[in-house]
Structures are given as C-alpha cells and as structure tokens.
C-alpha cells in the first residue's frame, strides 16, 4: 500500500485515491480540424514513462479534489505533489513528498487543462 | 545421511553464444512470445540466422510470473480466431517440441455473479459456438458438480449465478513451455543471447539496420519487439510511441495441498482466478494495480481483495497459507486487445499490448508475428490487431466481454 500526501488532507492510504493517468494532456483546441491521427493521439496515446512520471490522482474518499503528482514508476517514490493547473516540477527534483518547489510551479494560461 | 556426490548437472537445453556481428532478424525479448516467434521464424520461414536478445535471463519476466491459464473463449471474431488458433497450437506443441510441458485441458469456468454477467456470458457462449470455440453455459448446480469446492450458496456477497465453461481450456507449466521453445530454437541454429540489453537502434533514414546492446552493436535486416511491459521504452528508443500503459499485475501461490481443485475458475466481477498447479500450489491472480508501474510489484490491498474473494468462493482455502506473492509488468491497451504488426519504423515490427493475457497467446503470437517479420506483411489472424486500428477506429473491444482478468 502506497502512502500519498493529499494537498488538502495530508498523508492517506492509497486506497482512498483513484488514478487519473498522465497529467498535462490538454484538450485539443480545434477539434473540427483534427485528423484521425491526431484524434488517435489524443484518445489512445499517453506517455508510458519508466521513471519520473507526472500523473493525476483524486482523493475520492477525502476532499474529492484532483491534484497532480510526480512519481517514479520504478521505485513508486512520490517526488512531488502539486495543484491542478500548475506545470510539472522539473523531473528529478529533490522535492520531498507532499511538497512542491514553489519556484517550479507556474500557473498555466487559462483554458489549458492539466 | 551423508550425500557423497551431488547428482550430475543435467545437460543445458540451449547454448549461450556470444552475439554475432549480424543476423537476418533480431527478436528483442527472450520471453515466451520472443522464443515462440523465433521458433516459427526458423520452422515455418527457414530463417535460422536469427537471434533472440534477452536483457535478463531467459523467460524471467512475465513468462515466469503468469498464472498459466490457456483459453480461447473471447467474444469478438478477431479475438476468437487468433486465440483459438493459439489453443489449437497448444494442443499439438508438446509433440512438435518433443517436450511434455504438462498442458492440462482441465477446462476453464468464468463465473457470473450478476444478471448483467449472466446475459453477457450467455451472449459470449453463443458467439464462441459460432466461431467454433467450445463453450457451454452452466447453471449453479452444474457449476457445483464440476467444481465441488465452490460455494454456490445465496448467502455470499456475490453469489454464483452460473458460469461459462470451455472444456478444452486449461493450464500448462510456463517455465517448461519457454524451455521447450528455447531448446528447439537452439537446435535449429537460433542464437539465444541472455544478459544482452538493447540500448538503442541503428537507423538508416526511417529503416532500422541494427541494434545497439551492452554487448556490442548487431547489424540486422529486421527487428521484432517482444518486450511486453517494456515495449514503450524500446519504441521510444526507435523513435515512435505505442498506445500502451504498463501496470503491475500481481499473483500468488499457496503452500502445497493435495489436489482439491479440478478445473480453473475465473471471476471478473470479484477479480480473482484460481487453479491448482500439478505440484499442489493453489495459484491465484488478481486484477492490475491502477497506477502505471515498472516495479514488478504492486500494492498489498490488491492481494487482500483478491484473497477475500477467493476465500468467499472457496471456503476451504480459508486456512491455506500464502507461500509467495509477486508482480509482473503488463502492457495494457485501451481496447484490451494486443498489437501485432508493423510499426512506423521500416523493418521493425511490434508484438505487444497483450496485457494480462499474453501467456495463452504465446503460440498464436509467435506464429503470426513470425509471418509478419518474414514477409513484411501481417498474417490474416493478426491483421486486425494492427497499430492503425487506433486511428481507423476499428477497435477490438474485449474489455469485460471476454474477461477483464485474463
């Protein structure tokens, strides 16, 4: 069982959370102009990183809020937890679990989903 | 008692050659699929100047970690065709490979626990029959007759409302399957090279011409990827992406018991599948862990839920002790069907996305993938399982239809 630090509720068991897959996949801007290949990319292709991976989780049985997490997919170590709408912290950053380095967190332009 | 002499070491079943400078084809991944592909390349297509590269030891990945279930009762025509062909190969392979790997056609039951399950199951039995796959619908009493240790009482959380049954399905000894293929490959001149990790690919324009490894560069005309959970990593080295996600999948065995379980029982709804190995261990598998992971281990609550389901369905397991648990890395696709075919890189071919059910597909994957590599075009059986289906929308959606758990 993994232990995750919810940004709102603190450290909780993994079973309280649900997985949302890769973070920072924006909804396509001009859907009418998209090719089949572009649709395939958006619908079916996600990074499958071996190593630090930015992903989304929701604290289903707690605050029910979504947040982002940078996690090593080999060791499963949580490298950073940061809010939706922020850019991914630099991979490999030594930020402790449950915190994120303020210098690397920027708010994306409105309309960009994370 | 004093043992004076250790018994003589048995003969090795295959050589351990150093890699040559070049091969006609290189298969990356020395698991079941890689070995089966090499076997059919040599046997059906006369390609014997080929190598299988394995970064660890032979068949030490998912081939050593699966729960050995073999069946072909898939819903859709495309799946039924390739898995049934695979099952027919399982039926002749012990003789062809001259190796008794204990293929036991003891049948597989897929339990139904809800009215939805029942309807879906009966529909699948009908579809199976139309595709020449043996399938029956069993009511709870028939389930009990076939597998007396199953609890069919109404007083459990998910009562057994019936089951589909495929009599020709069963289990086999996974390690021995790999060794059987490896020995035959070796006899035909295929080089099986262990401890040989691929670190990159040599390309001439968009055509692959070689493989970089920790044991030197190998030139080759064709490359076949059979790396299961690590397929994305290899694809990235080659410069393309695959629509797969790698997840941990866990399984466990109990201590040895006398034979009590005559068949194989699977339940999608409660996420457990159970058989009993020839030696006597109860072998159980779970559903995948939700998160992406390359760690070959998962979270304990998944095992806990799986055991809870198993003990409710099989009350006599309550006092059995877990001997060991483990995890593998499974490469899942969004339609729960594999990808076997061409890749965006010329002369490079991919076999991946078998997810939680690759073991049963070993011979079918090998046969069709070998055809694809040798001829540069898919075999009719793997043509529907192309990478393009994610663009065309011709998905083969086996989620739930033929069992989430494989």
Image (spheres, helix red, strand yellow):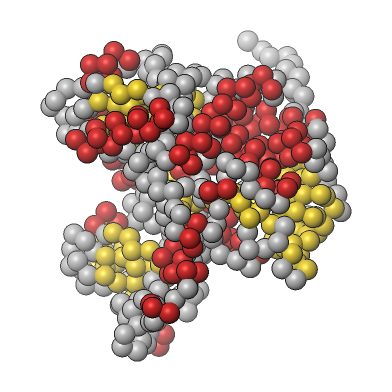
Location of residue B43 in the rendering, given as x and y in whole percent from the top left corner: 75, 33
Residue beneath the point at 24% across and 32% down: B118
Residue A111, relative to residue B53: is it above or below?
below
Q: Residue at x 67, y 28 (%)?
A: B180
Examine the rendering and report whether any part of residue B256 can be seen. no
Task: Please name whichever residue, B248 or B331, is drawn nearer the observer in this view of the structure.
Answer: B331
Residue B160: horizontal and vertical position, in percent? 22, 27
Q: Is residue B194 left or right of residue B126?
A: right
Viewer-closest of B229 and B332: B332
Quadrant containing the C terminus of chain B in the rendered view: top left
Number of dots carrying numbers: 0
Pick out the residue farthest to the front. B130
- The N terminus of chain B sits in image quarter: top right
Q: Which residue in the rendered view is the most extreme toward the top?
A: B1
Residue at the extreme right: B21
Can residue B205 be seen in the rendering of this structure?
A: yes
- Please indicate whether residue B124 sits to the left or right of residue B337 in the image: left
- Residue B241 on image: x %, y %: 56, 64
Position of B11 relative to B208 (above/below): above
Residue at image position (53%, 48%) is B384
- Compared with B405, B384 (above or below) is below
**B41 relative position to B125: left or right:** right
Residue B385 in picture, x, y percent from top left: 53, 49
> Which residue is depicted at the point 29% across and 31% down?
B122
Image quadrant in which you'd find residue A58: bottom left
Instruction: Give whichever of B310, A76 is nearer the camera.
Output: B310
């Amino acid at each position: 069982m993994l232990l995750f630090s919810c940004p709102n509720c603190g450290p909780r068991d993994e079973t309280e959370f649900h997985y949302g897959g890769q973070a920072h996949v924006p909804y396509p801007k001009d859907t009418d102009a998209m090719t089949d290949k572009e649709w395939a990319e958006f619908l079916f292709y996600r990074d499958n990183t071996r190593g630090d991976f930015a992903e989304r989780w929701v604290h289903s049985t707690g605050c029910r809020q979504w947040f982002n997490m940078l996690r090593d997919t080999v060791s499963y170590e949580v490298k950073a937890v940061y809010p939706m709408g922020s850019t991914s912290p630099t991979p490999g950053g030594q930020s402790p679990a449950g915190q994120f380095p303020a210098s690397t967190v920027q708010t994306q332009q409105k309309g960009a989903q994370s | 008692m004093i043992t004076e002499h250790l018994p003589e070491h048995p003969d090795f079943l295959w050589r351990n050659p150093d890699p040559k400078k070049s091969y006609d084809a290189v298969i990356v991944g020395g698991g079941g699929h890689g070995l089966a592909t090499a076997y059919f390349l040599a046997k059906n297509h006369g390609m014997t100047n080929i190598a299988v590269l394995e970064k660890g030891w032979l068949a030490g990945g998912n081939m050593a970690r699966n729960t050995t279930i073999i069946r072909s009762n898939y819903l859709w025509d495309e799946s039924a065709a390739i898995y049934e062909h695979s099952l027919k190969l399982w039926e002749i392979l012990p003789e062809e490979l001259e190796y008794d790997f204990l293929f036991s056609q003891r049948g597989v039951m897929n339990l139904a626990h809800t009215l939805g399950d029942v309807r879906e199951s009966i529909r699948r039995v009908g579809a199976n029959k139309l595709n020449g796959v043996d399938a029956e619908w069993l009511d709870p009493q028939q389930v009990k007759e076939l597998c007396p240790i199953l609890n069919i009482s109404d007083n459990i959380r998910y009562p057994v409302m019936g089951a589909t049954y495929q009599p020709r399905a069963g289990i086999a000894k996974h390690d021995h399957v790999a060794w059987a293929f490896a020995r035959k490959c070796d006899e035909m001149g295929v080089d099986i090279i262990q401890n040989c990790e691929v670190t990159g690919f040599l390309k001439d324009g968009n055509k692959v011409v070689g493989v970089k490894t920790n044991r030197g560069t190998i030139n080759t005309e064709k490359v076949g990827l059979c790396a299961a959970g690590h397929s994305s990593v290899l694809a990235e080295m080659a410069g393309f992406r695959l629509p797969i996600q790698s997840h941990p999948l866990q399984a466990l065995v109990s201590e040895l018991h006398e034979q009590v379980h005559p068949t194989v029982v699977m339940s999608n709804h409660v996420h457990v599948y159970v058989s009993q190995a020839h030696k006597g261990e109860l072998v159980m598998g779970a559903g995948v862990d939700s998160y992406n992971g390359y760690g070959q281990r998962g979270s304990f609550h998944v095992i806990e839920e799986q055991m809870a389901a198993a003990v409710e369905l099989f009350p006599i397991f309550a006092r059995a002790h877990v001997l060991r648990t483990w995890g593998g890395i499974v490469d899942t696709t969004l339609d729960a069907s594999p990808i076997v075919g061409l890749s965006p890189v010329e002369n490079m071919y991919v076999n991946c996305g078998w997810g939680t059910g690759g073991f049963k597909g070993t011979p079918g994957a090998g046969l069709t993938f070998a055809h694809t590599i040798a001829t540069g075009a898919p075999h009719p059986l793997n043509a529907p399982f192309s990478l393009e289906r994610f663009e065309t929308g011709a998905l083969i959606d086996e989620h739930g239809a033929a069992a989430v758990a494989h």
